[in-house]
Amino acid sequence: MTQDSFVHKGKRKNLVEYLRHKIGISDENVLSAMNEVPRHLFIESIFEDFAYEDRAFPILAHQTISHPSTVAEQSELLQVKQGEKVLEIGTGCGYQTAVLLAMKALVYTVERQKDLFDFSKKKLREMHLYPKFQSFGDGFAGLPTFAPFDKIIVTCGASVLPTELLKQLKVGGKMVIPLGPTDEQVLYRFTKVSPTEFEKEEFGAYKFVPMLGNTNQ
């Protein structure tokens, strides 16, 4: 496995300064996590030299690893506190999962692409990072067995709001999700203010891979 060298750490420090000053990330918990997690270990080695640029890269199953700025922005919008239960829909290669773990969250994560589920599980173990629960399954269904959650993060675009996920949120909890058609989604944050009421905030246009139902064997 490629090591985390001084060069990588230096590039990561530069990325954090970029996120702070150019993107406007101010949550020190997010910035510290982004500085800690070696993004280059989650992508193919041919992209390693560019791992700390604000770029997305292809990963398995025709998916992508999100831009660092997107990971940082979604993580900041979640307002994660240490020890909170966070449900992540779309484990992907495991990079966002690792950032949430570095933020001291208790992470429950679901991935519906078998190749990515296997890759992320192996990768996180290699790095001695352990979600509370890692599952291969349908993200639309969430993880009702472990509900309610303090926070829910959806890392793939959904054409319609998955109401089942809102049911699994604690009152006072927040869900960050991109919603809209495939070519362009809008990032939203829903705050559950009562068992049946939600506040909705909008945070601009993004492009995510689509959220898929069912699982592939």
Image: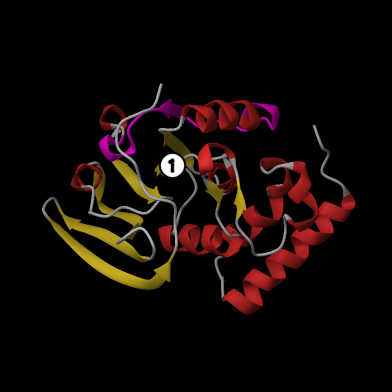
Residue 61 drawn above or below residue 49: above
Where the N terminus falls, by quadrant?
Answer: top right
Q: Against 180, is 103 above or below? A: above
Q: Position of residue 156 (x, y in %)?
A: 41, 50
- Based on the displayed image, in which of its 4 quarters is residue 80 positioned? bottom left
Report how many numbered discs are placed on residues in the image: 1
Q: Residue furthest top?
A: 217
Q: What secondary structure is found at the residue carrying circle 1?
A: loop
* Part of the protein shown in magenta: 125-142
Instruction: State which quadrant residue 89 falls in.
Output: top left
**197 shown above or below 64:** below
Q: Is residue 89 above or below residue 70?
A: above
Q: Residue at x 55, y 25 (%)?
A: 118
Q: Position of residue 105 (x, y in %)?
A: 49, 43
Please tell me in which quadrant of the rendered image residue 86 appears.
top left
Please state if 74 lies on the left or on the right of 127 as rendered: left
Residue under numbered circle 1: 90
Give the crowd class for mark 1: few <14, some 14-19, many >=20 residues within 10 Å. many
Magenta segment includes 194: no
Q: Which of 116 and 173 lies nearest the eye of the viewer?
A: 116
- Relative placement, left or right, of 102 versus 17 is left
Residue at (63, 70) in percent of width and height: 19
Question: Depth check: 121 or 113 in front?
Answer: 113
Q: Quadrant of the C terminus?
A: top left
**Which amino acid type is marked by label 1?**
Gly
Would residue 152 be found to the left or right of residue 75 on screen?
left
